[in-house]
Image (cartoon, grey):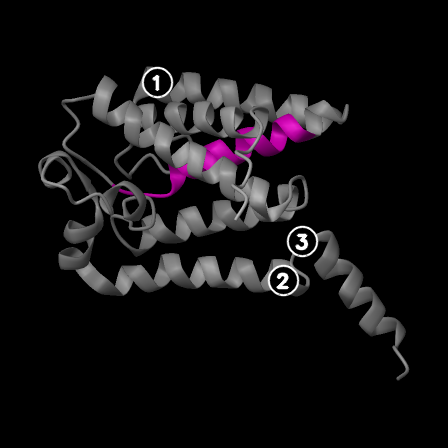
Amino acid sequence: MKITRTDAASHSLTRSANCDGRYGAALFAVLALLLGLCTLGERGRMALRYQREPLAHGQWWRLLSAHLVHLNLTHALLNCAGLVLLWMLFAREYTPRRWAWILLASTLAIDAGLWFLRPLIDWYVGASGVLHGALAAGALAMYRRRDGTGAAVLLFLIVKLAYEQHSGASLFASDLPLLPDAHVFGVFGGLLGAWLPRPAAKPL
């Protein structure tokens, strides 16, 4: 089969954007999940969000599902845009298994931080905290291989977190409510997940 120059250029472009093959399929699946959950409406969001009282009564799924549901479609689209950007920049910086460990560490850091350190926060939704963890992990990977972009991204992240803590508003979407601490906890978890070794699988 003859591959045309156009096909080769297209493949090179999608690969450089980390959207080729299984990477592209995985990105599409995650975007479909985040946007698909928006169709559940307010009732679905209430059932899936982080909320202290239901969690205290054993509704543990909220610790994961809270990071997949959003306030509205605008909120979800903003986080989807952030995900696409991070995917294009960092998807190949770690193996898929390592990314899964990083995202889990970021998720659990946010949940633990809200539960133990911010007991007055009753509920929370959104993927932005976990995305901040992924941003920190990706930038750290670049910095480790002496790519100056990694240092620049880490500096930007520090400035962004400081601004949000001071102003209480998002740097990019000031009209949406923000929980700055979730971003801080997410960054801590992302860096921890990138730094610490992934737990070894138990032999069968």
Q: Amino acid at mark 1?
A: Gln
Q: Residue furthest front?
A: 204
Which of marks 2 and 1 precedes in the sequence?
Answer: 2
Mark 3 crowd level (few <14, some 14–19, many ≥20, 10 Å Cα): many
Which residue: 30% across, 60% down? 37
Task: Report the residue marked by disc 3.
Answer: 18
Magenta stretch: includes residue 133: yes
How far is mark 3 from mark 2, CA to CA? 9 Å
Which residue: 67% across, 53% down? 18
Q: Amino acid at mark 2?
A: Arg
Numbered range of the magenta stretch = 125-141
Q: Is residue 169 visible?
A: no
Magenta stretch: includes residue 143: no
Name the main secondary structure of what is drawn in magenta. helix
40 to the left or right of 76:
left
Instruction: Find residue 194 and report its horizontal and vertical position in percent.
Output: 57, 29
Task: Report the residue marked by disc 1.
Answer: 165
Query: Looking at the picture, does residue 40 appear above or below residue 195?
Result: below
Of circles 1 and 3, which is in front? 3
